[in-house]
Amino acid sequence: MPRRSPADASATNGEENRKLPAVGSVRRAQQITTYGVGGLMAIADQSYIIRGLDSWDVPKEPTLHDVRLEPRLNVDGFHRPPATRVANGYGVHVRRFPKTYSCSKCNALGEFADLAKSWTDNRCTRCEVPLAPSRFMMACEDGHLDEFPYWDWIHADPENLRAPSNCSRRTAVLALTTDGRTASLRSIVITCSCGLHASMEGAFGRLALRTLKIPCRGYRPWIRGDRATQCTKVPQTLQRGSSAAWFPELRSALSIPPWHTELMGQVQVRRRHLVGKSAERIEDFAQDEGWLDPGRYTAEQVLRTVRALELATAVEPDDEDQETFAFEASSTLRQEEYEQLRKTTEDLPENEHFVCEPPSDDADPIPGIDEVMQVKRLREVRALTGFTRIRPSQGSKADRARIAALSSSPETRWLPAIDVVGEGVFLTLDPHRLEAWEAEVNGTSGRVTRLRAAHEAVLAWRGWEDPSSPLTARFVLLHTLAHALINEWSLDCGYPAASLRERLYVNDHMAGVLLYTATSDSAGSLGGIVAQGERSRLERSLAQALDRAAWCSSDPLCMEADSNGADGLNLAACHTCILLPETSCELNNTFLDRAHLVGTPDGSFPGYFPQPGAGG
C-alpha cells in the first residue's frame, strides 16, 4: 500500500512527524511489473513516484528464496512487496512527483508547496480549484528523472536573438495557458512574469533540450536524500503517463526439483550446518533433526539435497561485462527447466511447487508436435533487478550500465520479488520435422534474413560491440506459435490473454515452450489451462489457431509487409492477428511472423505446419 513520504512534508512546519496516510493501493504483482521502484503512479488527481528500497518496511531477513536465482543475481534473498492494509505507517512509500502543478482557473504554474493550501490539500490557495500535476517531465537514458524546466524553456536563447532578461528562477512567476482549439503542443503556452513566453511545440524533439543547452542534472527522486549530480546524457521530454518513463528489468526462475522440495526448504534454513560438510557430518545432523525417522527421508536423500544446494550456490553472478541478448531462452536456467519439464514428476508432498505429468488420453500424435506435458502445479519467482527509461535494455554492456539502481546503498543484499503459483502446458516440436523444415527455410532467402538484418541494425545502433544477431527461424517459429496458442486459449477457455504467459526454451538442443498462468488471483490455478494439454483438445485448438494465423483482416498488407512493429522486428504480425498484451510476452511483441507457422500464400516461404488446420 503506497504511503506518502515524509519528504513531501519537509516544508510544512513539522507535519512530517505525523502518521503517514495511505494514498492508494496496488497489487503485489504490480509493484514488480507496473508500479515498481522509480515508476510513476497516478492516484486520483495527483501523481507520485515509488520510493527506493531504502524506505521499504520489510523484515531484516529475506522472506522469499530461490536457490537458483539468488546466486545469479548476487543477493541473499528476496522480499515480497508490503501489502498491509493496516493504518500503521507500513507499506511502500511514495513521493509526490512531479512537484510542478498548475491551476486550471488562474493558470498558475509552480511548485505544489507554493500553490497548494497544505501538503494534504491540493486545492489552489487562490481559487479553491484542485491543482493538476505537470503533464511534462524530463528524463535521460541513464534513468534520471527531473521536473520539466519550464523557466529554462522560456528563457533559453542559444542564438541570443532575444533581449536579455533580469528574470531569475527564484523570482519568476509562471503561468500555463491553453486556447483549447487544438490538441497540439502549440496551443499550450508558458508565460513568465517578465513578459517572455513560449509554446510547448518542439519540446519532444530528441535534441530539443540539448539545443537550448538544458542539461540533465542526474536527479533520482526515488532515492532518499538524493542530490543532483553531473550527467552527460541527452535529456528528453516525456509525458508523465508515457510508457517510456519506466521499463522494468525482471529476472525469473521456476521452482523445480531437486532445488525446490520440502526437504530442500529445511536444508536451506540450516545451510550453515550442512553446506561444505562431510557425508558423515551431514548424516549425524540429519539424525539429530529427526529427518531420518521412519517414513521421512533417507540419508541418501538428505546428502543429495545438500549437494544440490552446494551446486546451486556455487554459480557465479551474472557477468556484467558480457553482452547477452535480451531473451534468456537459451540460458542455463532455462536448460535446467527444459530437462525437468520433460520428466514425469509425481504428485507427492515433497514436490509442493512442481507437478508435471503427460496427458492421460491416448490420442494419436499431433503432426509437428513431439512431447506434451501437463504442468499441474508450478511456482515462478519474479524479481525486479532495476529499470531503464526512454528505451528498454537489450542486454549490451552499454545497456546494463544504464540500468537504474533500486537503492542508494550498494550493500543492499535483497531485491523485491513475487512468487506466482499456477499451472501450464509444456510442448516441444518434433525434432525430425523441425530439422527438415530448418534446412528448407535456411535454403531460401527473405524472411529470416530480413528479420536478422533489422535486428542487427538495432543492436549496432544501441552500441553492441558485436552486433551479429543470434536470431534463428526456430526461435521465431516457437515464439509465434506461443502467441497463436495463447490467443486461441483465451477464446477457448475464457482466460484473459493478459493472465497467460509464455516461457521459451530455444537453442540448438532445445525447442519447447511453456504456456502458463501469469497470475495467481482471479485467473490463477483453475484447471482450464491444464485441460488444454490433453492431446485431443490440443490438436483441435492448434488447428484452430493455425486457421486463424493463415488469414488476418489486415492482409495482404500484414503478410506482405517488409517489416512491422517497433524497429521493424516483426514481419507478418499485428494487433489484429498475433500480438499479445505486453505482460504476456517475454520480448515486447517482437520477433514474430505468422508465415513461419503457415507459410506465405505464394509458397515462396514454407511454414512449419504445411497448411492451416494441420493435424485437424
Image (tube, grey):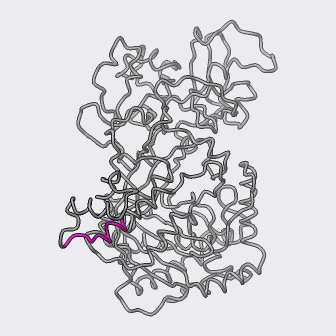
Dividing the picture into quarters, in which one does residue 309 lie?
bottom left
Count of marks, rendered view: 0
Q: Is residue 471 above or below residue 15?
A: below
- The residue under the point 40% across, 49% down is 417
Dividing the picture into quarters, in which one does residue 535 lie?
bottom left
Residue 455 on image: x %, y % = 71, 60
Residue 531 on image: x %, y % = 35, 78
| Residue in front for this viewpoint, 311 or 337 | 311
Can residue 584 be found in the magenta stretch?
no
Dividing the picture into quarters, in which one does residue 179 lie?
top right
* Relative side of 460 to 509, left or right: right
Check the picture and name the quadrant holding the N terminus: top left
| Residue in front for this viewpoint, 81 or 113 | 81
- The residue under the point 52% across, 40% down is 241
Can residue 300 be found in the magenta stretch?
yes
* Relative side of 552 to 226, left or right: right
Q: Is residue 301 above or below residue 104?
A: below
Q: Going by the picture, which residue comes out furthest to the top?
A: 166
The prevailing secondary structure element of the residues shown in magenta is: helix
- The residue under the point 45% across, 84% down is 540
* Relative side of 391 to 266, left or right: right
Q: Is residue 334 above or below residue 268?
A: below
Q: Is residue 380 above or below residue 479?
A: above
| Residue in front for this viewpoint, 243 or 397 | 397
Q: Going by the picture, which residue comes out furthest to the left?
A: 294
First to last magenta residue range: 295-305
Residue 81 on image: x %, y % = 36, 44
Residue 182 on image: x %, y % = 61, 36
